Amino acid sequence: MGLFRSDELLGIAGETLSFALNAAEETHPREYMGYLRTEEARAVGLDRNGQIITDILVIPGTTSDNSSATVDANLKPNSAQIVGSVHSHPSGVLRPSQTDLDTFRGGEIHIILGAPYNFTDWQAFDSDGNKIELDVLQVDLPDAEEFFDITQEDIDRELDDSKDDSSGFLSWLWR
């Protein structure tokens, strides 16, 4: 991410919305909850300035039942890339509850997913609980398998590099 970032939210990656809907369906009848994280549009192949929701962060220790999901606020990442939340309503009702509205104050956009979790069973809201339009964008997200495809050779190279340069991904080990 560059020094100057455009704060305009352009939309959500279709793949990310699909992931959230599938996760909510798998969690059903319990509520599902996560945080929305963005990337620069140019980082995912769009020739525009702005941010795109590309990731759902699920926080360890999140608890849920048929009527609520709770995250320990102390575990929420402190990052400008976190722009809001996503959670499911197993009832299918796509309106925020009073509890939802209380938690919406912690972000600029919030998505509610409703059963049966089809691609049309969701709605975005601003921090005041007003419905907003959020475009679903087809962008090229990094392949998760590629992201986690680290070989022993990569680790050895990184360890060798970190002895000379403290900027590698394992450099925190040497501090």
Image: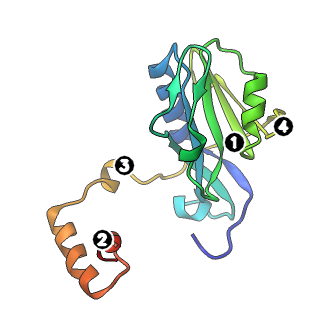
The residue that disc 3 covers is 144
Q: Nearer the viewer, mark 3 or mark 1?
A: 3
Q: Residue at x 53, y 22 (%)?
A: 64
**Distance of label 3 from label 1 (alpha carbons):** 23 Å
Total marks in image: 4
**Distance of label 2 from label 3 (alpha carbons):** 25 Å
SS for callout 1 = loop
Q: Position of residue 37 (x, y in %)?
A: 58, 50
SS for callout 4 = loop
**Distance of label 3 from label 4 (alpha carbons):** 34 Å
**Residue 173, numbered label:** 2
**Nearer-N-terminus badge (2/3):** 3
Q: Position of residue 100 (x, y in %)?
A: 73, 28
The amino acid type of the residue labelled 1 equals Asp
**Residue 128, numbered label:** 4
The residue that disc 1 covers is 135
The amino acid type of the residue labelled 4 equals Asp
Q: Nearer the viewer, mark 4 or mark 1?
A: 4
Q: Residues within 10 Å of mark 2 (few under 14, many from 20)?
A: few
Q: Nearer the viewer, mark 4 or mark 2?
A: 2
